[in-house]
Image (cartoon, rainbow, N blue to C red):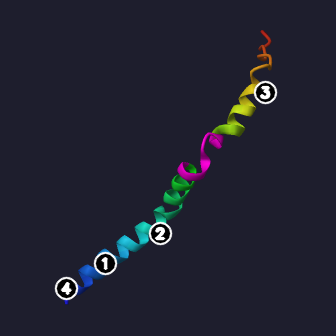
Amino acid sequence: MVQFFRDLLLLAIFIIGLTAFMGIISHWFSLKVFGGKSVFKFVERSKSFQSNWKNVQRRHQ
């Protein structure tokens, strides 16, 4: 009887853990398969805009 509850607990931990990491696993898989080189397209575009900005100077009091 104790072995049954131990096995049930291990199964529950496995199912809960798999469910918790399913989103992370599917996101990683989709980036590797469908992402290609366009993964950082928006990050690179915003960096190119911000590279031409002037730095803000602090006023001395």
Q: Amino acid at mark 2?
A: Thr
Q: CA distance from mark 2 to mark 3?
A: 39 Å
User: Mark 2, residues whose alpha carbon is within 10 Å: few (<14), some, or many (≥20)?
Assistant: few
Marks 3 and 1 sit apart, C-alpha to C-alpha, by 53 Å
Q: Residues within 10 Å of mark 4 (few under 14, many from 20)?
A: few
Residue at 63 percent across and 42 percent down: it is 39
Q: Which mark is residue 2?
A: 4
Magenta span includes 41: no
The answer to which of marks 4 and 3 sits earlier in the sequence is 4
Which picture quadrant has residue 36?
Answer: top right
Q: CA distance from mark 4 to mark 1?
A: 11 Å
Identify the mark nearer the N-term, 4 or 1.
Answer: 4
On residue 9, the disc is: 1
Residue assigned mark 2? 19
Q: Left or right of 26: which side holds 51?
A: right
Q: Amino acid at mark 4?
A: Val
Nearer to the camera, 57 or 16 = 16
Location of residue 57 with respect to 43 vertically, above or below? above
Return the disc, 2 or 4, that comes first in the chain's sequence: 4
Query: Whole-percent x and y of residue 12?
Result: 37, 77
Q: Nearer the viewer, residue 56 or 49?
A: 49
Query: Main SS of the magenta segment?
Result: helix
Image quarter in which the N terminus is found: bottom left
Asked whether the beta carbons under mark 4 and mark 3 sit within 8 Å of each other, the answer is: no
- For the C terminus, give its image quadrant: top right
- For residue 18, which numbered disc appears in the image? none
Front label number (3 vs 1):
3
Lateral position of residue 43 relative to residue 36, left or right: right
Label 4: which secondary element: helix
Tell me where the magenta segment starts and ends, as one range. Answer: 32-39
Q: Say which label, 2 or 1, has the lower sequence index.
A: 1
Give the residue number, with chain letter if any, for mark 3.
49
